[in-house]
Image (cartoon, rainbow, N blue to C red):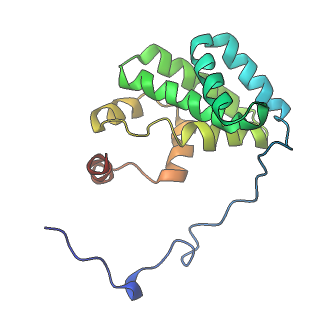
Amino acid sequence: MMSPPPDASQVISDAQVGLWEPPPPFDIGPERPVPESVRVMREELRRLFPKDAKYADKSAKAYADDDSAWTVWFEAFAERTRKAFRRGDEATAVAHMTYMSDKLEKADADARYAIDVDYVENFLYKLSLKKKRWAWTLIPQNLKDLYVAFWGEITPRKMARIQLML
């Protein structure tokens, strides 16, 4: 039996308690070329993971014919990591995350955005509870920190709620 939703007067938003601040504007569009640090990361990933990068290239091309869809590229690369988790391919998932974790240590704002917002926020999306638990044990700490900063702490109860939404 589900409990009734809370009365509107009882709901306190994150903004009211100071837990959330809107991010600064991040201009992504055809006028904004791919930042150099992001271009270098993409080229390295193409060299290290050609099959996964080809998938990301194709996904980004579906959004734009130029390089303006670089955020989509990193989301698609996160999808490849997620697919590695799904099929139990630990070597590929760990190789992807190790690269991102190492890059994060020296990242400028643009590269950090690509890793944080486009990659980390997406790589566990729609995994089964069992796969999420397994994947969590493989994720480097700095990537876990980014994930938790966005999605919140992963608790057994939250995992169960997530599973119900899938």
Q: Residue furthest bottom?
A: 9
Q: Quadrant of the N terminus?
A: bottom left
- For this rendering, which residue is in front, 70 or 36? 70
x, y percentage for residue 6?
32, 80
Q: Is residue 125 left or right of residue 50?
A: left
Q: Residue at x 53, y 36 (%)?
A: 141
Occupied quadrant, residue 107: top right
111 on left or right of 16: right
Count all numbered tags in the image, as a single digit. Answer: 0
Task: State left or right for residue 13 relative to residue 35.
Answer: left
Toward the viewer: 152 or 118?
118
Q: Is residue 27 above or below residue 34?
A: below
Q: Is residue 48 above or below residue 108?
A: above
In the image, residue 35 lies at what x, y percent? 83, 35
Percent x, y for residue 111? 74, 36
**Quadrant where the C terminus is found in the figure:** top left
Q: Which image quadrant is residue 36 in? A: top right
What is the x, y in percent for residue 30?
81, 42
At x 46% / y 79%, what residue is drawn?
A: 12
Closer to us: 123 or 16? 123
Could you tell whether 128 is left or right of 67 in the image? left
Residue at 66% from the left image edge and 26% from the top image edge: 102
